[in-house]
Image (cartoon, helix red, strand yellow):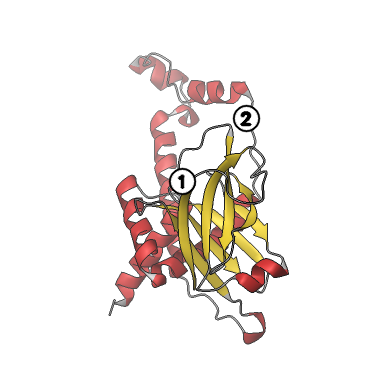
């Protein structure tokens, strides 16, 4: 049985996996754990629920073109080194490259501490009145690499699909998610961007068909989705549904 320290380390890795902070080897290792371990899949699904809604609420803001030039000028990235005399007479502490480097190191350390606090802080146990029924699926290619993970919140009638190691998709193709009931034809859940999280609302027909005998699959379709209501392109990933 894992010690508390080992459990905390694993929990931190799963949080870093969801945030995209791991290098390629560590990310591949966690993706394999998600595929083979229900406990790892459930932990990653919980962190996805915790972090992804925050990320989806943030919109991209492009800074003005002069901002980066001003930063480089203030940090003296493009300037010749000043002479010792000029440094003593004309420089300000706020123009010190060393100062800004230390501030950057300090900010990184603070961010790391905040992540550790978030991971290790005990979470309040959910009350029975607000308990959610969760199901998860690791949607992987034939090579076993997880392309996406999906979390289904039955009480909220929601499905959240999050990229893990998504396949490269041509610009004239869309990725489409399908629910495949046992012995039944695929049912479209919807089109989603392969490299971004996507939240789907599940209607009653889809909710009634979720369960451990069903599966999720991703196919490549024309822009806008399948024109026939059934997969027309290659199925590039699939995964069974299981309780979290």
From the viewer's side, name the closer residue of 148 and 115: 148
Residue 63 tag number: 2
- Distance (Cα) linking label 1 and label 2: 29 Å
Q: Residue 77: x and y, percent?
A: 42, 21
Q: Is residue 149 placed above or below 234 in the rendered structure? A: below
- Disc 1 designates what residue? 166
- Visible in this render: residue 118? no
Label 1: few (<14), some (14–19) or many (≥20) C-alpha neighbours in 10 Å: many
Q: Name which residue lies at 59% across and 25% down.
A: 67
**Which secondary structure, mark 2?**
loop
Label 2: few (<14), some (14–19) or many (≥20) C-alpha neighbours in 10 Å: few
Q: Name which residue lies at 38% across and 13% down.
A: 80
Q: Is residue 199 left or right of residue 183?
A: right
Q: Is residue 27 placed above or below 152 in the rendered structure? A: above
Q: Residue 19: x and y, percent?
A: 47, 52
Which residue is the extreme one toward the bottom? 128
Q: Earlier in the sequence, mark 1 or mark 2?
A: 2
Q: Name which residue lies at 44% across and 60% down.
A: 15
Number of callouts in the render?
A: 2
């Amino acid at each position: 049985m894992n010690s508390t320290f080992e459990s905390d380390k694993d929990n931190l890795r799963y949080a870093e996996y969801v945030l995209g902070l791991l290098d390629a080897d560590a990310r591949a290792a966690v993706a394999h754990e998600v595929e083979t371990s229900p406990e790892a899949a459930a932990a990653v699904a919980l962190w996805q629920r915790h972090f992804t809604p925050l990320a989806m609420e943030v919109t991209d803001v492009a800074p003005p073109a002069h901002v980066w030039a001003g930063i480089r000028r203030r940090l003296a990235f493009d300037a010749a080194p000043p002479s010792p005399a000029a440094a003593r007479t004309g420089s300000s502490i706020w123009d010190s490259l060393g100062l800004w480097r230390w501030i950057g190191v300090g900010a990184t350390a603070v961010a790391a501490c905040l992540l550790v606090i978030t991971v290790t802080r005990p979470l309040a146990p959910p009350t029975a009145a607000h308990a959610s029924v969760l199901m998860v699926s690791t949607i992987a290619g034939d090579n076993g690499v997880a392309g996406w993970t999906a979390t289904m919140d039955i009480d909220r009638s929601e499905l959240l699909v999050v990229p893990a190691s998504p396949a490269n998709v041509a610009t004239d193709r869309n990725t489409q998610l399908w629910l495949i009931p046992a012995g039944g034809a695929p049912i479209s859940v919807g089109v989603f961007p392969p490299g971004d999280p996507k939240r789907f609302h599940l209607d009653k027909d889809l909710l009634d068909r979720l369960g451990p005998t069903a599966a999720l699959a991703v196919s490549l379709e024309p822009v806008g989705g399948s024109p026939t209501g059934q997969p027309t392109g290659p199925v590039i990933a699939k995964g069974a549904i299981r309780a979290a």
